Image (cartoon, grey):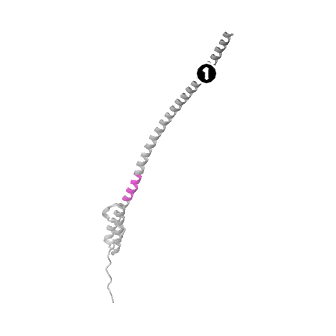
């Protein structure tokens, strides 16, 4: 029993991206599918030049999309670098300001510490003077009683 061969059906690849969505993947898919469809038919000499121009146009389109994709990342990196530089400058200014404030606080605390030491020294001097005055007063009282 002979059965005639079945006609070949076109089956879409499961990972295909419709060309109407645009973008790099769609252009690559369109380029590959065009090449596949053109390779199925017999070569036609009068279409070779047109096919060559179409292939160059498609390759140019794909390369432009690739360049745009790469440049987009570079541009974003450049903008981020500028933002980081501005933040570094702001942080440097803040660090300098905090350093000056720290120096002021250190000077104030040193002055306060010196003043407290002087008060302590004065208090000790006053106690010594009070003791000396009491000793002198006691000596005068003893002399006066005798």
| Left or right, 112 with reference to 132 | left
- How many residues crowd mark 1 within 10 Å: few (<14), some (14–19), many (20+)? few
Residue located at (65% from left, 12% from top): 141
The magenta segment is 65-75
Residue 136 horizontal side relative to residue 77, left or right: right
Q: Is residue 69 magenta?
A: yes
Q: Is residue 66 above or below residue 103?
A: below
Q: Is residue 117 above or below residue 41?
A: above
Farthest right residue in view: 146
Q: Position of residue 35 (x, y in %)?
A: 35, 69
Report the front residue among 91 and 117. 117
Residue drawn where x is 48% and y is 36% of the image: 98
Above or below: residue 143 compared with residue 95:
above
Which residue in the protein does label 1 denote?
127
Residue 112 found in image quarter: top right
Q: Position of residue 16 (x, y in %)?
A: 35, 67
x 47%, y 35%: residue: 97
Work out whether residue 138 or residue 75 is closer to the camera in this orientation and state it: 138
């Amino acid at each position: 029993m002979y059965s005639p061969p079945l006609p070949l059906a076109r089956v879409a690849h499961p990972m295909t991206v419709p060309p109407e969505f645009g973008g790099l993947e769609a252009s690559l898919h369109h380029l590959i599918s065009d090449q596949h469809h053109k390779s199925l038919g017999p070569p036609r000499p009068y279409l070779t030049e047109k096919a060559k121009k179409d292939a160059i146009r498609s390759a140019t389109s794909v390369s432009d999309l690739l360049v745009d994709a790469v440049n987009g990342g570079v541009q974003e990196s450049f903008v981020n670098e500028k933002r980081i530089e501005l933040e570094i400058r702001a942080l440097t200014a803040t660090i300098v300001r905090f350093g000056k404030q720290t120096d002021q606080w250190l000077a104030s605390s040193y002055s306060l510490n010196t003043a407290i030491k002087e008060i302590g020294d004065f208090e000790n001097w006053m106690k010594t003077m009070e003791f000396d005055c009491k000793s002198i007063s006691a000596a005068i009282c003893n002399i006066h009683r005798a």
